[in-house]
Amino acid sequence: MSFVSVAPEPAAVATTDLTRIGSAISAANSAAVVPTTALLSAGADEVSAVMATLFAEYGRQYQALAGQVAASYDQFTRTVLAGVNAYAAAEVANITQLATNVANAVNEPVLELTGRPLFGNGADGYTNAQGVGTAGKPGGWLYGNGGTGGISTRAGVPGGRRGSGSDRHRRYRRQQRLRWGARRCRRARDPDR
C-alpha cells in the first residue's frame, strides 16, 4: 500500500512559481522571435545569405519546439493545480466527516441522558399538519442556541416556544447582571465614584 503525503500550502506556492516561470519563458521566447527568425545576411555574398537563411530556419524550428514545450508546460502546471485543488477538497471532506463523527460521539450520550446535546444549536420547530407551531429543540449545554419555534397558522394558537440555549451563556449573563447591580449599589452609596 502506498501513501501520499502532500502539504497543500507548499504545493499551491509551487503552482504559482510554475506559472511565473512559464510566463517568463514565454516572454523570453516571444522576445526572441524576430532576432532569431528574421536574420539579415552579414554581407552581400551568397555564403552570408545561405548562413542567414540557415540560422533563420533554426530559429523557426526553435520557436515551433518552444511552442510545444510551452503547451506541455502549461498542461503540467494545470495538472499540478488540479491535484492541489483535489487534495484540498478531499481534506475538507475528510475533516468535515471527522468533525461530524466526533461531535456525534460526544453529543449522543449526553443527549440520551439529558435530552440536550453537549454543544451545538437546537433544531428549529416546524408547523405541523394541524397548523400549530412546534417548539424548537434545545441548544447544547455548553454551547449553542435553541431552535426557533414553529409558526402557527391556526387562528388564536400561539407559535411554538423557542428551544433553550446553552447554560454557559445564561450563567455569564447572570454574573453580568450581578456585577452591574453591585456597581449600581456602590454608586448609590458613593455618587462621586
Image (cartoon, rainbow, N blue to C red):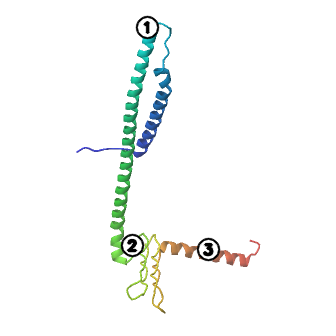
Residue pointed to by mark 2: 117
Above or below, 29 relative to 161: above
| Mark 3 secondary-structure assignment | helix
Q: To which quarter of the image does residue 4 belong? A: top left
Tell me the residue at 60%/76% (across/down).
177
Tell me the residue at 39%/48% (across/down).
85
- State the image coordinates of residue 2 (x, y, percent, origin top left): 25, 43
State if disc 3 and disc 1 touch (CB < 8 Å).
Answer: no
| Mark 2 secondary-structure assignment | loop
Q: Residue furthest bottom?
A: 156
Q: To which quarter of the image does residue 133 belong? A: bottom left
Above or below, 174 relative to 84: below
Q: Earlier in the sequence, mark 1 or mark 3?
A: 1
- The amino acid at mark 2 is Pro
- Of tags 1 and 3, the one toward the viewer is 1
Residue pointed to by mark 1: 47
- State the image coordinates of residue 170 (x, y, percent, origin top left): 51, 75
State if disc 2 and disc 3 touch (CB < 8 Å).
Answer: no
Could you classify mark 1 by the number of other residues whose Cα lies within 10 Å: few (under 14), some (14-19), or many (20 or more)? few
- The amino acid at mark 3 is Arg
- The amino acid at mark 1 is Val
Tell me the residue at 40%/42% (across/down).
11
Q: Nearer the viewer, residue 192 or 98?
A: 98
- State the image coordinates of residue 168 (x, y, percent, origin top left): 49, 72
Q: Nearer the viewer, residue 9 or 47?
A: 47
- The residues bearing labels 1 and 2 have C-alpha atoms spaced at a distance of 91 Å
Q: Earlier in the sequence, mark 1 or mark 2?
A: 1
Can residue 97 be seen from the camera position used here? Answer: yes
- Of tags 3 and 2, the one toward the viewer is 2
Residue pointed to by mark 3: 179
Q: Nearer the viewer, residue 29 or 80?
A: 29
- State the image coordinates of residue 41 (x, y, percent, origin top left): 49, 12
